[in-house]
Image (spheres, rainbow, N blue to C red):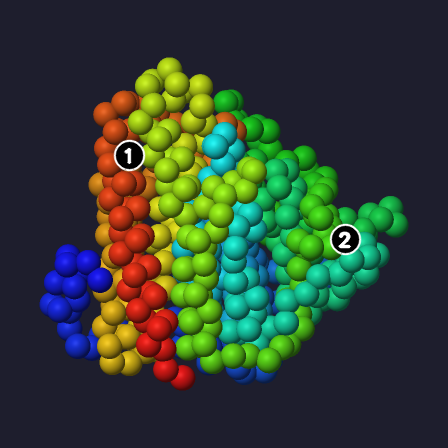
């Protein structure tokens, strides 16, 4: 343990207790009950069915990972009041750092690296599954919708981001599925009129129900046999303390992931960002696209990490409880470091308004230098956090 961290640890309180019941315990209580009360009703229309009231998905609300954002909305629809931060924590996405040398936005898809996705279902008593045959996928999707449970898939409409299918209709003897994507807000305008300098609205024949669900031309999604997932089957649940351990183990594993031909992970991903922000203006403009999205994704993940840890401390006792309290502070410091240089509203929210995901945030060389310094500081914080997390895991009880 470094001297600085040791000093902080020695000054920490012996115990920590949130002033309210942590989300992780509240949602655990809900998840263990039989699903008798769904959050939204199922209605029939157009020869099909739809789940009424699933809200719009949108970047810029500290819900910026489309995978975890969709899972959160899906589980909330089933009556499980789980938070986005809990999903980010249980799945391990909150610990990730991912980059490609070409700064392509696809690098941020969590499945590019190591995760503990199954941990979310295990913590809630849900057996998440996929199907290989497209006809079976279509039939099961209808059953899932009729039971009030959306379907998770990639590329339902537009770019290959995670999306939710929330309903289906039958038109001219053909099934048409519809639902929510993170791109909907780019194309939706309540008065259904095209506004100058905005993307065209979705055609009338591609808007379904009063919820304004959009037609999913990409259903059943990209690589449906692996990425189209169902949440309508019960499974055996594990204790939430065990789920926390799985998440913390994944936190360590992610930063030990060796680079692949296309992706860098952990400290190597930090180095890609740092070296990019240290380039000259000309080199930076040529190489470093989607910069707002990458910083916003990292910022959103670390924000979720400290909230998840803050709510999970109650699961531990004694020394481990105190150590995890210090880890929580370290992740909060990572967020503060980035926010001191770049306001949150200049990062991932740009996805909601422009097709090329660029803004003026990093065009000023001085700001890029400051951001490189902040990232170097956060890289050291990452190392310190993992020293403490390894300490917790080595002294795990029960």
Q: Nearer the viewer, mark 2 or mark 1?
A: 1
- The residue that appears at 35% across and 52% down in the rendered structure is 302
Q: Nearer the viewer, residue 87 or 257?
A: 257
> Mark 1 packing: few (<14 Cα in 10 Å), some, or many (20+)?
many
Q: Which residue is mark 2?
A: 169
Q: The N terminus is located in which quarter?
A: bottom left
Q: Give the quarter of the figure containing the C terminus.
A: bottom left
The dot on residue 372 is 1
Instruction: Between residue 373 and residue 64, name the one nearer to us.
Output: 373
Q: Position of residue 136 (x, y in %)?
A: 81, 60
Query: Can residue 247 be seen at all in this image of the molecule?
Result: yes
At label 2, counting other C-alpha atoms closer than 10 Å, the crowd grade (few under 14, some 14-19, many 20 or more) is many
User: Disc 2 to disc 1, how far (Cα)?
Assistant: 50 Å
Question: Left or right of 317: which side holds 223?
Answer: right
Q: Residue furthest right?
A: 173
Rendering coords of residue 67 (x, y %): 54, 53
User: In terms of image quadrants, where is residue 161?
Assistant: top right
């Amino acid at each position: 343990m470094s001297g600085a961290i040791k000093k902080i640890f020695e000054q920490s309180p012996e115990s920590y207790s949130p002033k309210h019941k942590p989300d992780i315990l509240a949602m655990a209580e809900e998840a263990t009950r039989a699903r008798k009360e769904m959050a939204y009703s199922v209605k029939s229309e157009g020869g099909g069915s739809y789940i009424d009231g699933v809200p719009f998905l949108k970047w810029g609300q500290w819900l910026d990972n489309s995978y975890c954002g969709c899972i959160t909305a899906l589980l909330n629809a089933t009556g499980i009041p789980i938070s986005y931060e809990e999903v980010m924590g249980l799945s391990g996405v909150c610990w990730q750092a991912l980059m490609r040398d070409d700064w392509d936005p696809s690098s941020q898809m969590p499945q590019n690296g190591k995760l503990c996705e199954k941990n979310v279902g295990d913590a809630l008593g849900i057996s998440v599954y996929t199907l290989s045959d497209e006809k079976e996928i279509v039939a099961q999707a209808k059953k899932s919708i009729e039971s009030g449970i959306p379907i998770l898939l990639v590329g339902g409409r537009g770019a290959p981001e995670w999306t939710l299918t929330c309903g289906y209709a039958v038109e001219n003897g053909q099934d048409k599925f519809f639902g929510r994507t993170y791109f909907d807000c780019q194309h939706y305008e309540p008065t259904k009129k095209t506004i100058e300098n905005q993307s065209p609205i979705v055609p009338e024949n591609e808007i379904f129900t009063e919820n304004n669900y959009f037609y999913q031309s990409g259903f059943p999604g990209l690589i449906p046999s692996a990425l189209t997932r169902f949440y309508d089957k019960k499974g055996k649940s594990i204790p939430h303390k065990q789920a926390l351990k799985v998440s913390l183990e994944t936190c360590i594993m992610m930063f030990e992931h060796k680079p692949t031909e296309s992706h860098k992970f952990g400290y190597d991903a930090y180095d890609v960002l740092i070296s990019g922000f240290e380039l000259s203006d000309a080199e930076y403009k040529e190489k470093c696209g989607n910069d707002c999205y990458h910083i916003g994704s990292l910022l959103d993940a670390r924000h979720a990490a400290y909230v998840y840890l803050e709510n999970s401390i109650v699961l531990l006792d004694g020394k481990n409880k105190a150590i995890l309290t210090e880890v929580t502070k370290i992740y909060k410091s990572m967020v503060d470091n980035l926010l001191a240089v770049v306001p949150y509203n200049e990062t991932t929210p740009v996805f909601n308004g422009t097709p090329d995901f660029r803004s003026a945030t990093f065009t000023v060389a001085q700001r890029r230098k400051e951001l490189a310094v902040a990232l170097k500081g956060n890289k050291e914080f990452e190392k310190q956090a993992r020293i403490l997390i390894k300490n917790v895991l080595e002294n795990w009880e029960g």
